[in-house]
Image (cartoon, rainbow, N blue to C red):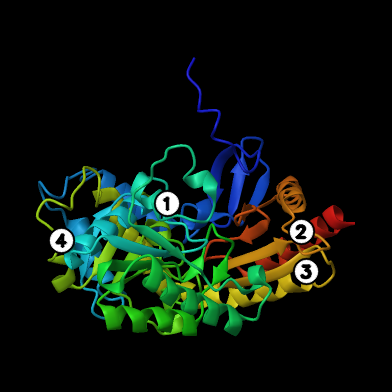
């Protein structure tokens, strides 16, 4: 009898029968408040009726039309619709299936467009698990260990993770930019650097937001040296942070944006967006794939955009995100076990630390497990997996946030007493 790989460990013991909105129901009929959202994927909640209806209707018409062989209406419609929400000037799209594929497509584009070999990434960033994407990933060695050598030409600069350094944000930002300049002087000359790849907020790296000064510093150096600024919005896009794009919080202009996760409410779809002029610099034959731009996934994505816009989910993410962040900070204020609480919109992380300020993995893991036992599903992240993260769907209500915070308060009290 076949079985799943033993390396696929569940974060919770739940075996799901069905999902509805913010809730998952297991095979025993128990209801769970899902503050994982499939790692930020089910943006409109589980089985939103409009997304379900769009997918069902499309399945009856065309399931798969390989888009370098034939064109289909859902892809054309989605492309047009995304033009209304993409950052100014980014008017050309390439679609794939996963976040890693989008990262690799952007990597290929930046090297081909600039003729330069090197990429700069930032400490704590997560960009995927395939070889090139894992080579760009520094959020944890678990994503890149054991299959070296990785891709060459990748250089790592600091991210302004103020809590980690024990500094204020301004000091951490000045340090990060100073070290980036030092990297240019010692490791990769600017005229050999194709791109910066950076998340507006570290995801797997610990839910650490960037800031305006840091991203402005990257944009300034990119403009000065002809380097492309690639913003990985795979987790932060589509309203998740309380703005449609995470980088909107920081008023920065990207050259390329990476999209996936919340784009299609659970259907596998990803892509990269760039200007037509930049996209045209990719070499012939360098973009393609069997399943990219799948018709059903595109129909679901178009319906997702309808739901996000017509139900005001970006605004809801902002309001509920403030509520969640304030509530999580109130819980942290009652214990010395949580050193920092931070976030943007519906991305909120609580970092557990020991009395001497070191990462506290055991307590974070105990809290995540205890929450699941009480019906609140959460995940951990960070290099030491000591950050408990909350990622509810964008449809979450004020009452559901309060319910989650009540459970969280009980959990933290139980594991820190």
> Do the numbered discs 2 and 4 sit on residues whose CB atoms are within 8 Å?
no
Rounded to the nearest angstrom, the CA distance separating label 2 from label 4 is 50 Å
Residue 188 visible, this orientation: yes
- Along the horizontal axis of the image, is 378 left or right of 153? right
Q: Which residue is tagged 2?
A: 407
Q: Which is nearer the N-term, disc 4 or disc 3?
A: 4
Q: Which residue is tagged 1?
A: 266
Residue 312 visible, this orientation: no
Say above or below: 272 vs 247: above
Rounded to the nearest angstrom, the CA distance separating label 4 from label 1 is 29 Å
Query: Dividing the picture into quarters, in which one does residue 27 lie?
Result: top right
- Circle 1: is it few (<14), some (14-19), or many (20+) Cα within 10 Å? many
Query: Residue visible at 31% across and 78% down?
Result: 222
Can you name the residue that lies furthest to the right here? 417
> Do the numbered discs 3 and 2 sit on residues whose CB atoms are within 8 Å?
no
Name the residue nearer the viewer: 29 or 268. Answer: 268
- Along the horizontal axis of the image, is 201 left or right of 355? left
Label 2: which secondary element: helix
> Do the numbered discs 1 and 3 sit on residues whose CB atoms are within 8 Å?
no
Label 4: which secondary element: loop
Label 1: which secondary element: loop
Query: Dividing the picture into quarters, in which one does residue 170 lie?
Result: bottom right
Residue 185, x across and y down, in percent: 38, 73
- Along the horizontal axis of the image, is 207 left or right of 303? right
Q: Which is nearer the N-term, disc 4 or disc 1?
A: 1
Question: Which of pointers 4 and 3 indicates the residue nearer the eye?
Answer: 4
Label 3: which secondary element: helix
Q: Quadrant of the C terminus?
A: bottom right
**What number is the disc on residue 282?**
4
Q: Which is nearer the N-term, disc 2 or disc 1?
A: 1
Residue 106, x across and y down, in percent: 28, 60
């Amino acid at each position: 009898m076949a079985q799943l790989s033993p390396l696929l460990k569940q974060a919770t013991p739940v075996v799901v029968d069905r999902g509805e909105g913010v809730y998952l129901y297991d095979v025993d009929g128990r209801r769970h408040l899902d503050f994982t959202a499939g790692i930020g994927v089910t943006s409109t909640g589980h089985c939103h009726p409009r997304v379900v209806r769009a997918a069902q209707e499309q399945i009856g018409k065309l399931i798969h039309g390989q888009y370098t062989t034939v064109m289909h209406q859902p892809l054309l419609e989605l492309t047009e619709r995304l033009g209304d929400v993409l950052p100014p000037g980014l008017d050309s799209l390439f679609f794939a299936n996963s976040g890693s594929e989008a990262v690799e497509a952007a990597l290929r584009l930046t090297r081909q467009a600039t003729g330069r070999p090197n990429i700069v990434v930032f400490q704590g960033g997560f960009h995927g698990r395939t070889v090139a994407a894992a080579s760009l990933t520094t959020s944890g060695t678990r994503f890149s260990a054991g299959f070296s050598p990785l891709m060459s030409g990748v250089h790592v600069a600091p991210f302004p993770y103020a809590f980690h350094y024990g500094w204020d944000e301004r000091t951490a930002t000045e340090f990060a930019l100073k070290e980036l300049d030092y990297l240019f002087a010692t490791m990769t000359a600017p005229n050999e650097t194709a791109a910066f790849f950076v998340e507006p907020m570290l995801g797997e790296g610990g839910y650490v937001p960037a800031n305006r000064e840091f991203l402005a510093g990257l944009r300034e150096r990119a403009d000065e040296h002809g380097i492309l600024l690639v913003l990985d919005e795979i987790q932060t896009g589509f309203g998740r942070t309380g703005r449609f794009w995470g980088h909107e919080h920081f008023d920065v202009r990207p050259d390329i944006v990476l999209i996936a996760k919340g784009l299609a409410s659970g259907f596998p779809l990803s892509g990269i967006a760039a200007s037509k002029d930049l996209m045209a610099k990719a070499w012939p034959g360098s973009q393609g794939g069997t399943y990219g731009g799948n018709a059903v996934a595109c129909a679901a994505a178009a319906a997702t955009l309808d739901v996000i816009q017509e139900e005001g989910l970006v605004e809801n993410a902002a309001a509920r995100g403030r509520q969640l962040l304030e509530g999580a900070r109130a819980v942290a204020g009652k214990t010395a076990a949580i050193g920092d609480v931070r976030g943007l919109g519906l991305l909120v992380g609580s970092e557990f630390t020991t009395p001497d300020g070191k990462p506290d993995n055991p307590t974070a893991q105990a809290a995540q497990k205890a929450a699941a036992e009480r019906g609140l599903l959460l995940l951990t992240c960070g290099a030491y997996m000591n950050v408990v993260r909350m990622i509810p769907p964008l449809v979450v209500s004020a009452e559901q946030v309060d319910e989650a915070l009540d459970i969280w308060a009980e959990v933290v009290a139980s594991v820190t007493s």
